[in-house]
Amino acid sequence: MKLTKATFKNFRLLRDIELDFSTEDKKPLTVLRGENESGKTTILTAIQWALYGEKALPEMRGGREYRLHPIDWDFKNDNRVRIEAIVEFQHDFYTPKSDGSFRTNTKKFRLIRETIEEVKGTNFTRRPSTCALFELLPNGDSEINPAEPELNEMLPPELREVFFTDGDRALSFIEATVSTKRQRVEKAIRSLLGLGILEEAGKHVDKAAIDLNRKAQDASSSDDLSRCISRIEEIDKQLSSLEPELDELDEKESLIQLQLKETDKQIDAILRKGDVEELRRKLNANKRNIEELEKAETRFEKKHIELFKEKALAVGLIIPQLKDARKILDNLKKRGTIPKSTVPVLEDRLELETCICGESLKPDTKEGAKRKKYLENLILEHKDSDQLSESLTRLHYASKDYPPVSDVEPSWLQMYKEVFENRDEVQEKLDKAQKEAKALEIKLDELKDTDIQELREKKRLLEGQKEDIIRNHESAKIRISSFKREKRELENQRDMILRKQQRHVRLVSELEAIKDIQDIIHATYQVILDGELRNVSDTMNEYFLKMIVAEPEQRAIIQRASITPEFDIIVYGPDERLLDPDRDLNGASRRALTVSFILALTQVSQVIAPNVIDTPLGMTSGHVKRSILRTAIENSSQLILFLTRTEIGGCGDIIDESASRILTITNSSHYPKMLQNDPGISENQVIRCDCDHHHVCEICERLDDRSNDELAFRKS
Amino acid sequence: MYTNQRRLLEILRQQHDKIEDRCDGYKEELLEKVAQILYLERQHSVQRTNIQQKIMDQCAALGEYLSKKRTDLE
């Protein structure tokens, strides 16, 4: 099925608009350009409403109905709004040829869906929509009545989300809980490959076969035949309980597999953080290390303090001044100012009681007492100046004991440097060890709530359950196969007896026919289930790696993507490590993975259908953006992309090569804030023009377009 | 044949090839009936119908075709 044209009237902002789409095989791309709030998503909804009716409308919060009429509808003037969508499309019908190939017959159709909404203020009521389908023939249109079954056959409703994709909603295949994602993926695969329909058909044909068998039993009088048919009936009963049992076991196994995967993930996460015992050992070793370092720090601290009491420091500090003092003291000595010994000599004389001149200093004579008094006065007079002179003399001789400045200075500084460096080094080690201890303590706190032993025990139990299920599964399979073999033999026996009885030719033919139908349907189901899921998985992987420009040989972070038999989309990193598409992939890769899945499904099922995608290139840029676009074009039978100007940026050349139709839509209410020219429309409305990414016209020209020299102006 | 799932048709065709041709025109009739059954199933999935009866009718019609051909041959 390919869309050719769509016309909408009074569908929200789409008051009156016609769009046409490319159906060319070589240029399958149609680009619908539109900025935010230009009506792109409304068009996506409108097409789906036309094709699928009310069930395709978005669900509203609080159970409200999704409004179809324009929000600024003048209900005071006319409160009944007629909403109409006309979609034209072509569809290929296949007729098998004798050589095994198919003859293709392309037919054209027009679908008209309409409804009426009655508007009362902010409320409205809507009538159920009506739908009319016409085949477009050269000699006039021919109505197909009823339309819905035919339409559903050409575009199955369960595939709506595969063919009509909102860029953000598309991620629903990989962004949800495990079971929801799985259901969505399974539903899409089963629908597109026809598994669901085959399964249902198989059940109904089996039921028809059981009924026919009973009919044969009722019609026959032979005991052998009766026994044979009774046994077939018994086997059918056994099979009808065994087959669901097998499905149930499959489901259980898949569930346990999922639980095992989760448990493994939890164990891995804990082991990545570390084993509790191992962490405790590390923490204890770390604490011992901290104690040693603290002791060393105290040692060096003391040494540091001691250093300031060192004589060498005092010397180091005094020597520069001593140099000048030496000069002064030497000078004083030269001049005889020091050493000065007047006071000791006089005191000596007084003690001897004899003066230097030989006269007596004894106080018993008047003269002696007079001389003694004189000398005592003299001593008092000279005492102060001699104390200074004595100090200077001591300094002079003391200064002789110290080496020159240049010899002293480095020794204390060297000691200081060594102590300082050692202390600094210990401090650094201590900081590091304390930080490590803190980190280990945090990890241990996190782990305290999780008992890895408990998880390992859970895993062991799950593995045991899995083994039981596999055993039961195998046993059920063997019993089914044995019953089927017995049933086949009994059926042949039954048919032979009936044939001999001549009058049951019709019954025998019916039994044979129904068996052939059963065989084809069941075998087709099995082949698709066994082989095609792998095909979808491989094709998705091929497209995905191409889109994200990943080279597995060059150790790319993303190595491959795959769909498991349980319908999980999984991504592998280097060394087969699992990546969670939801958490480990960036926005562009997630979008690429979803688009790859949709394209792979369409490709493998060989369904000719449009891929209509709203904003597929959001969050992408550069090579990845170009590659997503190119891969999507190469693998779609009809690709309709709703793109903003930003999304088109950097991809213009690819669009030039592959698009045979480019349209631009503009929201009239964007004037004057964003649009350059007044559209001259009082109501909010989407207007289209034929401008591509190289042109602008009076309708679509935006305020910032004037600064873009690459855009050419064309008359609308 | 209405369905546009070419891959499904291809596989269906391969399985159909393995079936014994019970009489002239039988296999074409068989393929047509299988395709019709799938069409009815799809119809039933969107609009509940008396699917069991419809499928029994298809099977009976094929049986009748086979029976008639056999009777004609006799």
Image: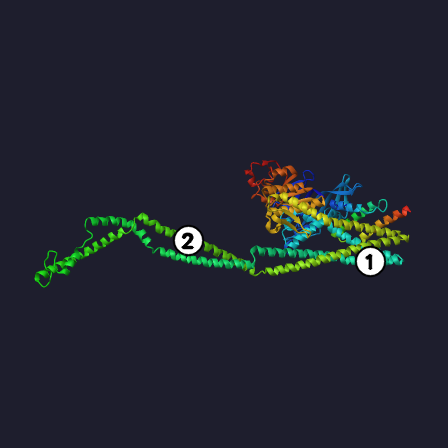
Left or right: residue A653 compared with residue A503: left
Point out the image quarter for the N terminus of chain A.
top right
Quarter where residue A635 is shown = top right
Q: Position of residue A239 (x, y in %)?
A: 78, 57
The residue under label 2 is A422
> What residue is shown with label 1?
A233
Chain assignment, label 1: A
Type of amino acid at the residue the image marks with label 1: Glu
According to the image, what is the colour scheme of the structure? rainbow
**Image coordinates for residue B60, horizontal then vertical, percent:** 84, 51
* Residue A290 appears in the rendering: yes
Real-space Cα distance between discs 1 and 2?
A: 94 Å
Q: Amino acid at mark 2?
A: Asn
Mark 1 neighbour density, 10 Å: few (under 14) some (14–19) many (20 or more): some
Pointer 2: residues within 10 angstroms few (<14), some, or many (20+)?
some
The numbered mark 2 sits on a residue in which chain?
A
In this view, A429 is above or below A107: below
Quadrant in the picture for the C terminus of chain A? top right
Q: Secondary structure at mark 1?
A: helix
Q: Position of residue A571 (x, y in %)?
A: 63, 49
- Residue lying at 69% horizontally and 47% vertically, measured from the top left: A536
Front one among A353 and A258: A353
Q: Are marks 1 and 2 on the same chain?
A: yes
- Is A373 positioned to the left or the right of A9 in the image? left
Q: Quarter-wise, where is residue A423 in the image? A: bottom left
Q: Earlier in the sequence, mark 1 or mark 2?
A: 1
At x 68%, y 46%, the residue is A538
